[in-house]
Image (tube, helix red, strand yellow):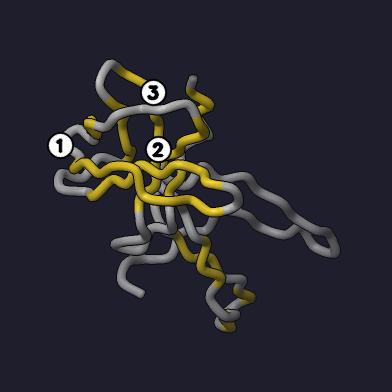
Amino acid sequence: MAGAWTEVATRPAGGTFAFTAKLLGPTSFRLSAGTLAGPLLVVPVAPLVKATPQEGGIGGAVLPARAGTRIQVQVLERDAWLPAGEAIADDVGSFFAELEVVPGVYRVRVAPARGFAEGLSPRLRLG
């Protein structure tokens, strides 16, 4: 794992510890005691995906922004999510998927990539 380790919490003698972290990307943690280091704990982080219905389709944003990120709009059919449209995010993470929106439940999906987990928008109930 590239990079340097940073101490985020210290256990008091005979006590326990806890900490809270706002992760902005894939991150690893490990416990250590002196020169002994425990195994890596890799924490998956999903991109934030926002979606809103707009005239002629569904738009939104993905953060962190990465130009060229492939966006898939999905519609719920019975118990399966089916492709309904696609878009590509621009350099600030914005996207617009042109599609005929019919009544139903939709979401936007970003596939796992570059160490990030799958990102999903909240469900949109349209119509």
What residue is drawn where x is 43% and y is 58%? 117
Choose between 76 and 27: the one closer to the eye.
76
Q: Which mark is residue 90?
A: 1
Q: CA distance from mark 3 to mark 2?
A: 10 Å
Residue 71 percent location from the top left of the image: 28, 45
Choose between 40 and 44: the one closer to the eye.
44
Q: Amino acid at mark 3?
A: Thr
Residue 10, quarter of the rendered image: bottom right
Judged left or right of residue 96, residue 15 is: right
For mark 2, give the secondary structure: strand
Using the image, determine if residue 88 lies above or below residue 43.
above
Residue 8 percent location from the top left of the image: 55, 54
What residue is drawn where x is 18% and y is 43%? 88
Residue 115, quarter of the rendered image: bottom left
Q: Amino acid at mark 2?
A: Val
What residue would you read off at disc 3?
52
Residue 63 percent location from the top left of the image: 33, 38
Q: Amino acid at mark 1?
A: Asp
Residue 67, quarter of the rendered image: top left
Q: Which mark is residue 49?
A: 2
Residue 5 percent location from the top left of the image: 43, 65
